[in-house]
Image (cartoon, rainbow, N blue to C red):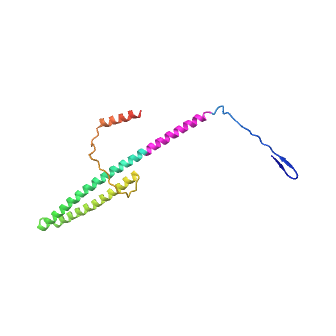
Amino acid sequence: FQSLNKDSVYTSSSRPEVTGSWNVFDFGATQAGIKKSLYDFLYEQRNYNWTLQGTVKTVIASYYQFLGAQATLKSKEAALKDSSATLESVKELKEAGVDTLADLLQAQSNYSQSIMELEAAKGNVKITLGSLCVAVGIPATTEFEVMIPLHEPKKEITLAGLDELIKKAEKSRQ
């Protein structure tokens, strides 16, 4: 390319050029990069598995806490029914002149305590349902019905059965 000016002439030229190099010895950098990528992958996979297991554990724990809270609610409802019946019978006995005022006050106190415990149990059911919702990944205010197990879980785990389960787990890892 040439440029003409009044006073001078400038000339420049360009030509194509290729540069190459060979890496004769990389001191293991390629293999190290491959191993690093593999270890990064394994780390992420285990981290994912760990997170998944933690989530499942949280959901299961929340579910059983909810079931426990529901069982407590049922027992508090039964206790309220019993204390109500006791209060009514003490009132009748007091009117008949058989019971004392102290017995009536004690029955009223037990009835009031049962009401308070029932309300606390209702609150606990709502709290554990909210915890279950959050563990599942939905808003805590979501209303839904939780399915109750159809049969009672086995109450006894023998040590022999536990050893058998551990051996199965060890075999599956090999």
Please state the horizontal and vertical placement of residue 68, each as a whole percent of the image: 30, 51
Camera-nearest residue between 152 and 7: 7
Q: Residue furthest right?
A: 7
Rendered-image quadrant of the C terminus: top left
Camera-nearest residue between 85 and 53: 53
Range of magenta residues: 27-51
Location of residue 143 by image quarter: bottom left
Q: Residue at x 41, y 34 (%)?
A: 173
**Residue 45 located within the stretch drawn in magenta:** yes
Q: Which secondary structure is most common in the magenta stretch?
A: helix
The reply, left or right, for residue 32 in relation to residue 67 is: right
Q: Residue at x 51, y 40 (%)?
A: 41
Camera-nearest residue between 155 and 3: 3
Number of numbered markers: 0
Q: Residue at x 32, y 34 (%)?
A: 164
Location of residue 85 by image quarter: bottom left
Please state the horizontal and vertical placement of residue 114, each as a whole percent of the image: 25, 60
Please state the horizontal and vertical placement of residue 124, each as a whole percent of the image: 32, 57
Please state the horizontal and vertical placement of residue 24, each as a whole percent of the image: 66, 31
The reply, left or right, for residue 75 in relation to residue 36 is: left
Location of residue 115 by image quarter: bottom left
Q: Residue at x 36, y 49 (%)?
A: 61
Q: Residue furthest top?
A: 24
